Amino acid sequence: MRWERVAVHGGGGPGKKWGHTCSAVLGGRLLYVFGGFGDDNRHTNKVHVFDTVNRIWSEPVTKGALPSPRDSHSCTAVGDNLFVFGGTNGTNSLNDLYILDTSSNTWIAPSLRGDPPNPREGHSAALIGKRLFIFGGCGNIDGAEIFYDDVYVLNTETFMWKRIVPSGIPPSKRESHSCSSWNNKIIIIGGQDTSSFYQSDVHILDTDTLTWCKLNTTGQILPPRAGHTTISLGRNLFVFGGFADNQSLFDDVYVLDVASGTWSEVMLTGEGPSPRFSVAGDCLDPHLGGTLVLIGGCNNTLQPLEDMYYLQTGIVREDERDERRIAKLSLRKQLKLKCQKQQASASPCDNALERFDNNTNVHHQMPVNYTQPSRHNVYSNEYQTPLGTKTFQAKVTKSFPNGYTVETVIDGKRLRGLLFSTKPRPEQTPCNDSIRNTGNGETDREKQNGDHNSVREATRPSETNVSDFQQADVLGGNSIRNELPVGGDTAQMKSPFPSYASPAHEVRDVSDVVNLESGMLTDAVDGGTKVSKENSSATNDS
């Protein structure tokens, strides 16, 4: 592993500061730096963006409700949106929440419900699924400093705050610790307690069972410290910097393997950062070889810093390793694996928190754009807002006795699917991709002198294709069933489409959603939907 001091092209940047945050979005393409305390002895609420490809700083013009200047806050990426909570303005601790939509650089102050945390700074935050966990920190009540060991959870879709009381022995009250997430677990490392003792202990909150436990670690144990920075790379947690007794600062790097509980001190090459605390950092795209980034901080003379470093770990993150393996699988197997992962990882946490969130059935649509989830965040697909009405045109490519195969293009992606009929059709009922109305009540089929066998045989898809679609469509335990109009005068089924072009279909259902993804149907629609040949668009209501 080696250090690399980042050479910035064109100057600029956030300048010297400490107590700020650094968050990677767009898979590590952009780094957002917010807040902090600068060398002008002032707090700031400015946003600076670093392009990691071109190595250029910029200061975007932000819109919306700007948060007040602050330091020692938390900033958590939820998809490609940044959730900023708490901190201090130098006089008072804060407990407000702001969201920065990085796709439009717009600040949002959402309307919050429930029981919010007390104002605090030096706390920590971590994301599990759609829930943002806040732990610890310190604040002021009637002029007296108070430390916390409580846990609060924010539902990032409904904006409902809940205080939870996990079982087990919690970490001692502390601030200036670090908090990371891995495998539905939250890991607390170090910090300073109410007696000004510095810690190196490791505590884990299992969000599936809401239970605290202390991790018994081995190896080269991390020296006690506070004000350090911890960056997660899969199950490996990299700890840099911090301070301890006698105002001693650290410039060392330790890594904790959470799965085994083993600490290791990392021996690095290259020019590294000087000893410091209150430094900001994050992990870049794993395609860059497991690169960590560190920006700014405060030195032993309490002066802010502005230098920037990459730590090249050479570690391939677990989710990237999974992606490489999945790329070798067929689309059908990828879909099955995806469903299994969602059922295994998403539901336990939701079930465990259900007793603390009685209002989860009340959904308030997020005023935040989640359409560009970061590859850096493996839970990003859970933050999609509930689907509304989607309209698209689909072409019937083939038909078979029980339904049709259709194709369409949505957002530039070519998608395929099946429409099934639950009602048996008489043999004389025409397939809608071979019927044309001549305008006088006589159909093309009637002009073919009953030669329907050749038409049906020419439009029937192969059994292999039908089988593949059917397996993909019922992975979730459902099936797609669409009722076709049968019986009556075929001349009443008016269709201006020629035989080589099929009309679009209207698909309506109020209970489930058709999700066209990766070229096939992933979630099936419940029965009772109807296909109308008179409409020119297909509408999916959820």
Image (cartoon, rainbow, N blue to C red):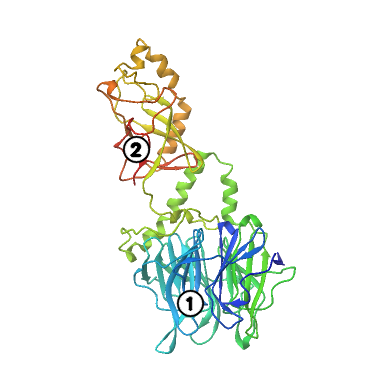
The image shows residue 409 at horizontal and vertical percentages of: 48, 38
Secondary structure beneath label 1:
strand
Crowd band around label 2 with a 10 angstrom C-alpha radius: few (<14), some (14–19), many (20+) = many
Camera-nearest residue between 103 and 513: 103
Residue farthest to the right, as pictured:
270
Residue farthest to the left, as pictured:
488
Q: Which mark is residue 472?
A: none
Residue at which label 1 appears: 87
Residue at which label 2 appears: 507
Split into 4 quadrants, where in the image is the N terminus? bottom right
Can residue 109 be seen? Answer: yes
Q: Is residue 254 left or right of residue 269?
A: left
The image shows residue 434 at horizontal and vertical percentages of: 39, 21
Crowd band around label 1 with a 10 angstrom C-alpha radius: few (<14), some (14–19), many (20+) = many
Q: Is residue 291 left or right of residue 342?
A: right
Q: Is residue 75 left or right of residue 38?
A: left
Task: Check disc 1 and give the amino acid type.
Answer: Gly
Residue farthest to the bottom, as pictured:
143
Q: CA distance from mark 1 to mark 2?
A: 49 Å
Task: Check disc 2 and give the amino acid type.
Answer: Val
The image shows residue 386 at horizontal and vertical percentages of: 38, 52
